[in-house]
Image (cartoon, rainbow, N blue to C red):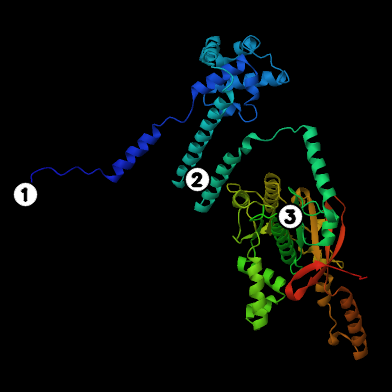
């Protein structure tokens, strides 16, 4: 039997503790030589600033003194209109008045910068090194927040919400949104406006944006435009979801057709539907019912023949290629929606977002509005922000208040929007879907309310006459349009398939 001592085993806890200690002792990425060399190059030749000004900002510097100097130099160069003439002599007054620079050694530190300069040829490379170190430091910060939150630093966030918050932070870093903004030269804005006008001129049918699949709507609005927030509202059973689904499906089909015409493997964009009320299966069944012309009620009961089923399968095969994505997360938060839209835009492209419906959403993670009106205001502002940030149209469905039912004329108005103030204010367009047939059906005469069969028959015939005038008809009331005219657009509605379409009131 050996008397040798066994090899000591290091416990996992000890290993993990050592690794954690080594991580804590690591110095965040920074390159002081690159920072000093770049500042020296700019002070020597202001053209070095032109090579980095489009992406490098004072906040990207690791050293506070270098960041302060870069800000002073930038301010002076911009004040001179970028014409140069900024060097250690012209900047002397700014340097001497700077307490931050004085603490670092004053003019002696500036002289050190000039000595560190090795030429302006590599100035852009130095700037990229500085920016890359900044990105790495931000990643460390985000990673630290993820770890701390997972350990319970933010007990108000559950696991999925922490994932959403982390993804949002990573997306903001990837797109560097925090550094964008500010004024835009009018000539640039004018150039963009001319490009849009040229696109409208070249397109047939007066459609500039994404098609809605509704001819008369596209004529009045020019299609669905990027960065617009459109509100589609209506009372229950009016067909809000059916109309929004029709628009989403038509847009997805147009994107697919465009890709085929251009010989692309896949469409440049896609359509996202956030269905907070219906499941993805129910929504898919509704689209299948509409396209296959098989009643959704019969599909649910299994009351379909072999021919109907074959058509059902054939249409399903065609539809599965469409760039249509459905998220049926109930009570989704604005933060999670924004994160998922960004992810979809990054992976498949994004051309349209549909939200059904906004009253079922929750505001951004970490916010606690004092009232329901304020909560809805935050949601609509957030949806508008998503539209602008991702440059896509967003269609949000909305409920109407019950006061519609108390009027003789039940056509909706802007004041009928539930928690209406912010919705009306933030939206670029507000539309109401209205079907007179729905309300008229409820007013069918009953023989028990008439004193004689003759009077009942007259009332019944009058009701039938009115029903014939509104049968399979709907109205899309464009009550507000920030960029165009308002008015009522007649639509065709087929209740059996919950399908909307163009209404042809006369034929040649």
Query: Relative to the observer, which residue lies in front, 461 or 201?
Result: 201
Residue 54 falls left or right of residue 125: right
Residue that label 2 marks: 154
Residue that label 1 marks: 1
Residue that label 3 marks: 419
For label 3, the crowd category at 10 Å Cα-Cα, with few meaning under 14, some 14 to 19 and many 20 or more, is many
Q: Earlier along the polypeptide chain: callout 3 or callout 1? A: 1
Give above or below for 256 relative to 162.
Answer: below
* Pointers 3 and 1 in contact (C-beta within 8 Å): no
* Pointers 3 and 2 in contact (C-beta within 8 Å): no
Give the Cα distance between marks 3 and 2: 31 Å
Give above or below for 117 relative to 31.
Answer: above
User: What residue is rendered at 69% in x and 16% in y?
Assistant: 84
Give the Cα distance between marks 2 and 1: 56 Å
Q: Earlier along the polypeptide chain: callout 3 or callout 2? A: 2
Percent x, y of residue 327: 61, 60
Q: Earlier along the polypeptide chain: callout 2 or callout 1? A: 1
Query: Relative to the observer, which residue lies in front, 354 or 414?
Result: 354
Percent x, y of residue 31: 49, 25
Q: Secondary structure at mark 2?
A: loop
* Pointers 2 and 1 in contact (C-beta within 8 Å): no
For label 2, the crowd category at 10 Å Cα-Cα, with few meaning under 14, some 14 to 19 and many 20 or more, is some
């Amino acid at each position: 039997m050996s008397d040798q001592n066994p090899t000591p085993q290091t416990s996992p806890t000890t290993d993990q503790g050592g690794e954690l200690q080594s991580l804590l002792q690591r110095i965040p990425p920074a390159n002081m030589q690159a920072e000093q060399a770049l500042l020296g190059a700019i002070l020597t030749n202001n053209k070095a600033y032109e090579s980095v000004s489009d992406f490098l900002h004072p906040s990207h510097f690791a050293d506070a003194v270098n960041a302060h100097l870069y800000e002073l130099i930038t301010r002076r160069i911009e004040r001179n209109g970028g014409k140069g003439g900024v060097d250690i002599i012209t900047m002397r007054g700014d340097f001497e008045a700077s307490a931050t620079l004085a603490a670092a050694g004053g003019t002696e530190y500036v002289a050190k910068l000039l000595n560190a300069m090795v030429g302006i040829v590599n100035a852009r490379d130095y700037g990229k090194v500085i920016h890359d170190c900044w990105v790495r430091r931000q990643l460390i910060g985000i990673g630290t927040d993820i770890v701390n939150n997972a350990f319970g630093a933010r007990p108000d966030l559950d696991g999925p919400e922490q994932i959403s918050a982390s993804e949002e932070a990573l997306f903001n870093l990837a797109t560097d949104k925090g550094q964008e903004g500010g004024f835009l030269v009018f000539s640039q804005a004018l150039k963009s406006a001319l490009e849009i006008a040229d696109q409208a001129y070249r397109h047939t049918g007066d459609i500039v944006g994404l098609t809605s699949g509704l001819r008369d709507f596209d004529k009045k609005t020019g299609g669905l435009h990027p960065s617009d927030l459109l509100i589609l509202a209506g009372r229950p059973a009016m067909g809000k979801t059916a109309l929004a689904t029709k628009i989403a499906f038509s847009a997805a089909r147009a994107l697919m057709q465009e890709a085929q015409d251009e010989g692309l493997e896949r469409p440049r964009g896609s359509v996202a539907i956030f269905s907070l009320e219906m499941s993805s299966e129910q929504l898919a069944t509704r689209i299948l019912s509409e396209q296959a012309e098989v009643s959704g009620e019969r599909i649910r009961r299994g009351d379909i023949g072999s021919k109907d089923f074959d058509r059902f399968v054939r249409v399903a095969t065609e539809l599965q290629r469409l760039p249509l994505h459905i998220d049926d997360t109930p009570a989704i938060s604005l933060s999670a929606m924004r994160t998922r839209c960004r992810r979809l835009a990054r992976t498949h492209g994004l051309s349209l977002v549909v939200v059904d419906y906004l009253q079922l959403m929750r505001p951004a993670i970490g916010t606690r509005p004092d009232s329901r009106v304020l909560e809805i205001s935050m949601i609509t502002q957030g949806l508008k922000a998503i539209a602008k940030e991702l440059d896509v149209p967003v269609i949000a469905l909305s409920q109407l208040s019950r006061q519609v039912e108390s009027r003789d004329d039940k056509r909706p108005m802007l004041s009928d929007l539930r928690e209406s103030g912010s919705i009306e204010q933030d939206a670029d367009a507000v539309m109401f879907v209205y079907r007179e047939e729905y309300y008229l059906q409820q007013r069918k005469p009953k023989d028990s309310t008439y004193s004689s069969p003759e009077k009942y028959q007259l009332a019944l015939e009058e009701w039938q006459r009115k029903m014939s005038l509104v049968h399979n008809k709907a109205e899309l009331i464009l009550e507000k349009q920030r960029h165009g005219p308002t008015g009522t657009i007649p639509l065709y509605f087929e209740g059996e398939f919950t399908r909307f379409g163009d209404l042809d009131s006369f034929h040649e």
